[in-house]
Amino acid sequence: MLNKDHPRYESLVYREKIVEAHKKGILADSGMIAHGRGETFDYLIGEKTTANSYNTIEVASCYFLTCKHPVLSVNGNTTALVAEEVAELSKLLDIPVEINLYYRTPERIANIEKVYSNLGVTELLGTDEDDFIDTPDLNGPRSPVSIEGISKSDVIFIPLEDGDRAEKLAKLGKNIVNVDLNPLSRTAQTSTVTIVDNIVRVMPLLIESVNKLMDYDKNDLKERINNFSNEDNLSTAIHDIIKRFE
Ligand code: PTJ
């Protein structure tokens, strides 16, 4: 039983979610290490959403609302922490959720599939029954993607992963929205829009911002996209961390 008065209560709640997801065969063993790395960077950014990240979240919403085929790609860590919010966003935008795992096993796919099915996600892709196509130049278990999902998408949400996938997907002309507490990770550096913040704070804000911007003129949203630079965004995120040491 967690003590609510504990100064790090929230952090302990999310650790418990991570441990539970591991016990249920949702989280990869390495998912624990990835969470620890995330916690370290969260500490450095002050465990709050910065003004820069609020803006970046709105830009991400602009992509989701103006692109034709957005897809939400999920892994074990994202599922452990924010499956409900992923399901809500998928329903709000009427877009698919695609399971894409680095440590892919039939058991983990089945366990993650069950989570989203129970949350009412109707278009759930990337399961073992799906039709796959390899991502060009990308090796490993993340390469096969759903023909109806990531393969035909024009914007992909890929939170909490680091590797070369973002770069390969970007080469195919796809827009990448990433959430990563580490602004220096390869995925953070090669994505179109990188939200440097904790996924548990990002998801409710993303849903709120999609709801807010939904009725805006599409040209205004596209202008917002055109005025955004991910390089500037990452530079501000890094400087926000540096300022915490001053
Ligand atoms: O479920 P699988 O098999 O697809 O495997 C998932 C993991 C996360 C184990 C795999 O993709 C992996 O090893 O990822 P990395 O290379 O550890 O990268 C994960 C990134 O997510 C790191 O840069 C962390 O800083 C970041 N991260 C971890 N927790 C959070 C986070 N970013 C935002 N919010 C978090 N809560």
Image (tube, helix red, strand yellow):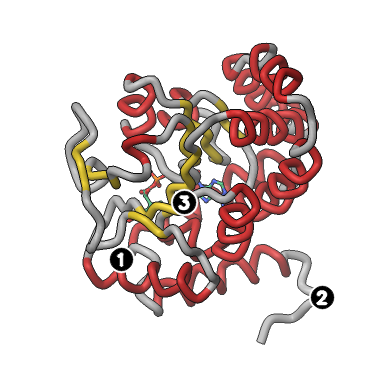
Residue 157 vs residue 66, the one in the foreground = 66
The percent coordinates of residue 201 (x first, y second) are: 70, 51
Identified at 50% across, 39% down, the residue is 70
Choose the circle earlier in sequence order: 1 or 2: 2
Disc 2 marks which amino acid? Asp
Mark 1: which secondary structure? helix
Disc 3 marks which amino acid? Pro
- The image's mark for residue 96 is 3
The residue identified by callout 2 is: 5
Task: Using the numbered discs, state the Cα–Cα distance from disc 1 to disc 3 in whole angstroms.
Answer: 16 Å
Q: Is residue 87 above or below residue 46?
A: below
Choose the circle earlier in sequence order: 3 or 2: 2
The percent coordinates of residue 142 (x first, y second) are: 27, 45
Q: Nearer the viewer, mark 3 or mark 2?
A: 3
Say left or right for 50 vs 87.
right
The percent coordinates of residue 228 (x first, y second) are: 66, 16
Mark 2: which secondary structure? loop
Choose the circle earlier in sequence order: 1 or 3: 3
Residue 121 vs residue 53, the one in the foreground = 121
Whether tag 1 and tag 2 are in contact, CB under 8 A, the answer is no
Disc 1 marks which amino acid? Ile
The residue identified by callout 1 is: 109
